[in-house]
Amino acid sequence: MLELDIDLPPGARADAARPLLREQVAGAGGVWLEGVREAFATDAKTGAVTAWHDGLAGRVAHPTAPNDGHTCLSETDDLCGLALRAGTHCGLVVDKVDPDPAGWTMAVIYLPPETGGARTLLTLNAGSGDGRSATYLFLSDDGDRFTVKGTGGALELTAPVEGPRSRPRLATVTLRGSELAFQENGGAIHSVVGSDPALSGKADLFIGCRSHRSGLLKTLGASVILEVLFWRDHTLLLPRNEADRAQHMALRRYMLWGH
């Protein structure tokens, strides 16, 4: 056994990664839907997920309008999350996450399907949520590449999928004005500059879908969503200050030691 007679920095211990991230996200006023059984509420008869609770700020992800008991809970080994089915609306939504005009970040940890793409993972939707006239930006895993795209052609970014299918993936998106950035796990940060997609204000965060619209079935893939995080005013991939960098480091440490 290796023993060190020194003071270690926060996050150096593997079991410190989760509480460190919780402290950081809570201090930032962020949302963290954790992949732990006690965070989920399920229907007593069908087992369908009826709510996913954020243990930090009391926010709740609830089923979207077309999701009539479609979402099941996946529990394997130490992993717990939403089991999504291809072509079936299994999405949840957190209402009014209110992104800051100066910039925000969303992240998802998920298990991809054995074949094909996970398709839509997260969407920030600043309209009515019906998907017809709303302004939104979505993150999609298309199997061999990631796509982050805003409606109206304001912004679009693609990056190759590099992580194996056998392990969870972390996908992080930051928007700062008209600059968009993406990172898979702790890999290269990809960025583009376009036009501001106007996503500030009363926007909703959709999980596993793009809106309340019942169509768009080809955008719905199979995956297990394990964790979802949202920072309304921190730009982790395009840091403006030390607080942004601290959030990013805590997230990366958690992914490294927790998954």
Image: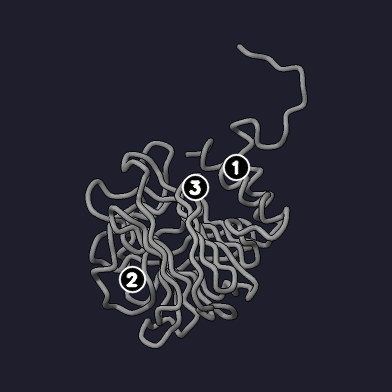
The residue at the point 26 percent across, 59 percent down is 85
Which quadrant holds the N terminus? top right
Mark 3 vs 2: CB contact within 8 A: no
Residue wearing tag 3: 36
Which of the 4 quarters of the picture holds residue 201?
bottom right
Between circles 2 and 1, the one closer to the viewer is 1
Q: In terms of secondary structure, where does tag 1 sit?
A: helix
Tell me the kind of residue under disc 2.
Answer: Asn
Q: Residue furthest bottom?
A: 133
C-beta proximity under 8 Å, tags 2 and 1: no
x and y percent of residue 23 in the render?
A: 69, 49
The vertical placement of 215 against 148, above or below, is: below
Would residue 143 be seen by someone viewing this image from the given angle?
A: yes
Residue 37, given in percent of the width and then of the height, sits at 47, 48
Give the mark nearest the N terminus, 3 or 1. Answer: 1
Dot 2: few (<14), some (14–19), or many (≥20) neighbours within 10 Å? some
Q: Element under label 2? A: loop
State the separation of the CA atoms marked 3 and 1: 12 Å
According to the picture, the residue beneath numbered tag 2 turns out to be 67
* Mark 3 closeness class: few <14, some 14–19, many ≥20 residues within 10 Å: some
**Marked residue nearer the N-terminal end (2 or 1):** 1
Residue positioned 43% across, 74% down in the render:
150
